[in-house]
Amino acid sequence: MNYLEQIDLERLPKHIAVIMDGNGRWAQQRQMERVFGHKNGVQSVRETVEASAELGIEYLTLFAFSTENWSRPQFEVDALMSLLVETIEAEMPTMQKNNIRVLSIGDLQRIPEAARLKLQKCIADTANNTRLAVVLALSYSARWEICDAARRIAEDVTKGQINIQNIDNEVFSQYLTTHNIPDPDLLIRTSGELRLSNFLLWQLAYTELFFTDVKWPDFRKQDYYQAIVEFQKRERRFGK
Ligand code: IPE
Ligand code: IPE
Ligand code: MG
């Protein structure tokens, strides 16, 4: 089946978010260490970014590392951080050539300094690119983000900068790490898990959800197109 032909380019989702899951199981099935799965997931990231840029998707958010993932064995955390740095360095020329902007959401203070500096440089260097925004969710969890927003709103109330009566959806959204990013239209989770795992709980309120059994290292453009075709069959009502 050629899913690309079935995509209506006039009705593309503006923002697609992906929970890239299943790297560890993919490796274990091959009698390999989990980290082997993470390394093989990089090609899937490349394909998804490339497909997004080719189609004209405006925002692609990738859940790369959750707040809870800090509790994994230290060697796995270290391997994921090194992979992050290596991938950013290797992909920078392609990002620039293809006019892709990199953003991040999450608690960057927790990221080891070497990785954080590379990431911040990548964000700064691509800041003026206009084609596709790739949003990396790193050390991110929705409950962290919502608590952080609540704390900062409380501070601003104390300082008299906002009035309690004025706190509504819009004001609250402004305090989230996603404040200048539209809510996702489509969420994809790979590897057959049917849960959100603390990802974008506020922003996914009316997002269409697509789950696939394909594990992240096997995820290819066709799988991505399939999710978009499925999205275009849905009727979005937003409660109306
Ligand atoms: C997703 O794959 C990548 C990260 C969470 C960093 P997993 O590492 O969760 O792999 P599984 O789900 O254990 O197979
Ligand atoms: C969610 O996957 C986080 C990322 C993909 C980065 P997990 O593998 O950490 O989530 P659970 O443990 O299956 O809920
Ligand atoms: Mg997992």
Image: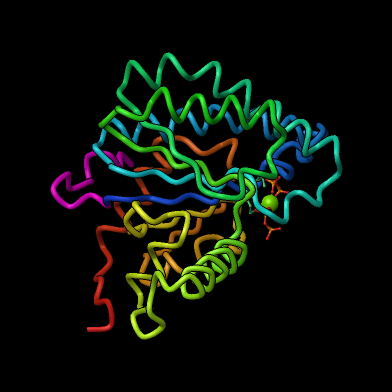
Q: How many marks?
A: 0
Q: Residue furthest left?
A: 10
Question: 182 or 217, which is in the foreground?
Answer: 182
Q: Is residue 3 magenta?
A: yes
Q: Is residue 79 magenta?
A: no
Q: Residue at x 50, y 33 (%)?
A: 45
Looking at the image, is 29 positioned above or below residue 204? above
Question: 69 or 222, which is in the foreground?
Answer: 69
Looking at the image, is 63 positioned above or below residue 97? below
Q: Residue at x 51, y 74 (%)?
A: 158
Q: Residue at x 28, y 83 (%)?
A: 239
Question: 156 or 187, which is in the foreground?
Answer: 156
Relative side of 132 to 30, left or right? left
Task: Give the image location of residue 169, x and y in percent.
Answer: 35, 75
Task: Give the image location of residue 175, x and y in percent.
Answer: 44, 62
Task: Give the image location of residue 166, x and y in percent.
Answer: 33, 80
Its colouring scheme is rainbow
Relative side of 63 to 238, left or right? right
Q: Which residues are magenta?
A: 1-13
Can you say which quadrant of the picture contains the C terminus?
A: bottom left
| Quarter of the view holding residue 38 | top right
Can you say which quadrant of the picture contains the N terminus?
A: top left
Task: Give the image location of residue 151, x and y in percent.
Answer: 57, 69
Looking at the image, is 82 positioned above or below residue 70? above
Relative side of 110 to 178, left or right? right
Looking at the image, is 131 positioned above or below residue 65? above
Q: Residue at x 61, y 43 (%)?
A: 108
